[in-house]
Structure formats: C-alpha cells, structure tokens
Image: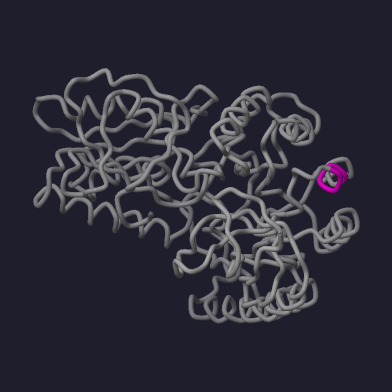
Amino acid sequence: MSQSLIKLARPGRATSSPVNDRKTTIGFVNLGCSKNQVDSEVMLGTLVHDGFQLTGDPKKAEVVIINTCGFIEEAKQESINTILEQGKLKKKGSCRVLIAAGCLAQRYQGDLLKELPELDGVVGTGEFGKIADICRDLLAPKKRHQRLWISKPPYLYDELAPRLRLGKQHSAYVKIAEGCNRNCAFCAIPLMRGKQRSRPVESIVAEAQRLATEGVKEINLISQDTINYGVDLGLHQGLVSLLRELVKVKDLHWVRPFYLYPQQITDELLDLYAGEEKITKYIDMPFQHINDRMLKRMHRLGDRAAIETLVDRIRTRIPGATFRTAFIVGFPGETEAAFNELKMYVENAEFDRVAVFLYSDEEDTSAVDFDEKVERSVMDERRNELLAIQEEIAMARGRARIGSTMYVMVEGVSEETEWLLEGRHEGLAPEIDGVVYINDGTAAAGDLVTVEITDAATYDLVGHIVT
C-alpha cells in the first residue's frame, strides 16, 4: 500500500449515516509501520463516519491524504517521493487538496510546506481525530493558502473511535500505547510521537471484544515500547495485567505482542506466555547490537551478558518459542571488531528471524554529533553479511520442520497462485515473516487447520491439511 491509493478498507465498527449530502471523494496513501496503519484506519473511519467517500481511483480523488513515515532516511525519501507523485493529480486528476499527515509531517512541519508547494495542509500526529474538519476547512471556497495543524502529540484513539480496517478480516492490529520514554541515541520517535501514553486496560479489552464479534481471530498488540505498557498509568506489570484480560475474550485464538524492550522481562510474564494457549509463543525483541561499547553509545540499557542471560531465560521458560530480533549496523564507532562480534553472535544464537537496519543520521538525536561515522558502502556489506548468515539458519530451521504437523491460520488464496492456499503458524507474524503454502485441502480465511509440513524454503513452508 505504500505507493498507491488504498483501494479497500474493512469496517472496524458500524458507522452512522453520512452527515453530508455531497460526498467528497478521498484518496488515501498509507506508508510506514503497523502503528501508522492503525492511525490510517482511524482517519479513514473518521472520514467515512463524517460523510466523505473513499475512492481507489487516484484521478477521482478530490482530497488525497498521505500518512507519512519519518523513521529513517529511506522512509523519509519514500514519503517525499509519494507527495510529489500524488501532487501530479492536481494537474491531471480531480485533486483539489493534498495533505501530508503523520510522522514526517509532525517532525518537519513548515519545512514541508516551504519545500513542497503541492501541499495544502500538513497534519501532525496529534491531530488525527480532527481530520474530517481539516478536510472541510481546506475545501472551503476561499482563497487557497497552505495550513499547518501541528500540536504536541497527545492524541490516542480509544475503543469508540471509528476504524476502517485494512488487510485481512481475521487479523487486526491494536495499538495499546503511543510515544516512548526511552532515550536511544539513534531514534527520533519520541520527537514525533511524544512521551508514552498508555490506553486503559478496559479500553483495549473493549476494542478486542468488538473485533472478535466481527470475526477477528488474531490481535497484534503494538506500541513503541510494549514492555513498558501501563507505567504511565501507575500499573505494576501492566502488560501482564492486560494479557490476562485479553485471553478471556471469546473467539480470539491468538494474541501477539510486538516490540518487547529487553529489560523488565519478568518470570511472571514469561510464565504467562508459556501457560496461555492464546498468547503466541513469539518473541519480538530488538537488541540493536551485542557489543558492549556499541550498546552504551546507543544509550541502550544492559550489556551483552544481560542479553545472553535473557535469551537463555526465554528459551528455557518458553520451549520452542519463535525469536525475532533486530540489529543496526554502521552505528558511529562500529569498528570491524565490533561488527565481527555481532556477526559471530548472530551465527551462534540462531534466532528464527533477524532484521538488519542501516544507521542513518536523524536530526536532533544525540547520535548525529557522534564521531567515527561509518561509510554507507561498509554498512551495506555488513548488512548483507548478517542476512546471509541468517538465511542459512532460517533454511536449516525450516527443513527441521519437515514431517511435523502444526496449527496454521489460513490467510486465504495465495498471492502467488490461485492453486494454493497460504497461512501462518503462530511463529509467523503477519506481513513481516514468511507463510505456509497449503497445496492440498480446503479451508476458509481465518480457519485454524492442522498442516503437515512437506517442504521448506528459506522463510516459507509447504504442507497439506491433515483431517
């Protein structure tokens, strides 16, 4: 969905009848992560609830909204390129108003309006709930002038917010908190999203209950710092309290938390993972590096010894858990020796999934002023080396599953060919991990079936349904 107008939106709650007789058409482009996707779904739901009409035809959209990403340099450039591309619709389409919303808008504000005259409005992360009023204001019959809607980002949606969900009907993202209190040297998220603000447990559970009645079988809990959920509400072990309530929701099969910071992991949380069938045995925990000097320069808590002890604890208390982590290569000061230490660690730790990001200077972060910068070509080589190591590990792990059976949630007809179904076992997260191709058997999207694995690729599995 990153380079085209959204063509399909699925209802997240019943909406009232349109309040306007004249339905202005809205085109919407969603960029970035799953947290951005939830923001887009809320904006879409708000617009439809307020009488606007969505269109998947770019030339018919009178208002085009781009929910931008500003996390790293590549994401920022993609956002700018998308604004330029959609801006052409003012000459060859029906577009009257072009809006940039989200992280890039929050971070660069007036600079975007100055550098991109195609834009009519810039809407920050604290203004999503006002998107319908903003569109009406920009459409008003008056002299055109560019406008900013930027405030400190206090906005956090709740269970009453209209949502038009994107993607699969049986799987949904639920944002449990916004913002971050950490001070990682490379990260600009606190600048764009503010300090952490957690939703009350009751609000999240109410949303999960509504989603379950709509056919959702899997909810994916997202935030910038999920392990820290509820600290701002005065909760002790807030994530544990939340999960204990969510597993009670009828008709939910999987509850999958993302983005666990590698501190504050209690035995109580791990035992809950191990003992509750609905909580996926899937650990998503970015480490960023393993070298002690790099971790300290990154302003990450803990050291190599603490990370290794934690990994051992997790694997002991949750046997068979799928472990996904992420690392940054090329952070200022990463010597060849530090990288080799990371490379050896990845080879020996044998994680199920590893994401590798290139460091990029982000304005107003402390790492910008660090010395010992690493050349881009060196970063590319290091990322490729890590990914090559991980591919071998992933292939071996996939082949080891041949002959086993596992529960698989069916996604529907495969995107590769209509002759296959595809699905995911609990160790495969939506969109970021591989899939299980099903070459024999019948099932509907959202069904949980038993599949015998007969073949494996690097990150995907192949099998047939066992009755």
The residue lying at 44 percent from left, 25 percent from top is: 14
Picture quarter with the C terminus: bottom right
Q: Is residue 29 left or right of 459 when viewed as pictured?
A: left
Which image quadrant for residue 371? bottom right
Picture quarter with the N terminus: bottom left
The residue lying at 63 percent from left, 53 percent from top is: 409
**Along the line of sight, which residue is nearer the eye, 130 or 366?**
130
The residue lying at 37 percent from left, 28 percent from top is: 46
Up the image or down, 98 lies above or below 408; here it is above
Instruction: Inspect this view and state whether residue 331 appears.
Output: no
Which image quadrant for residue 248? top right
Total count of labels:
0
Q: Is residue 99 left or right of 374 when viewed as pictured?
A: left
Q: Position of residue 167 (x, y in %)?
A: 46, 48
Q: Where is residue 12 in the image (x, y as percent from the top left)?
A: 47, 33
Asked whether 446 falls inside the magenta stretch, the response is no
Up the image or down, 48 lies above or below 415; here it is above
Asked whether 272 falls inside the magenta stretch, the response is yes
The residue lying at 74 percent from left, 75 percent from top is: 402
**Along the line of sight, which residue is nearer the eye, 84 or 370?**
84
Instruction: Inspect this view and state whether residue 121 appears.
Output: yes
Magenta extent:
271-275
SS majority, magenta = helix
The image's colouring method is: one colour
Q: Is residue 7 left or right of 388 when viewed as pictured?
A: left
Which image quadrant for residue 425? bottom right
Q: Position of residue 178 (x, y in %)?
A: 57, 35
Up the image or down, 163 lies above or below 293; here it is above
**Along the line of sight, which residue is nearer the eye, 96 or 405?**
405
> Quick one: which residue is furthest to the front in this view?
467
Q: Is residue 298 left or right of 368 when viewed as pictured?
A: right
Q: Position of residue 269 (x, y in %)?
A: 83, 42
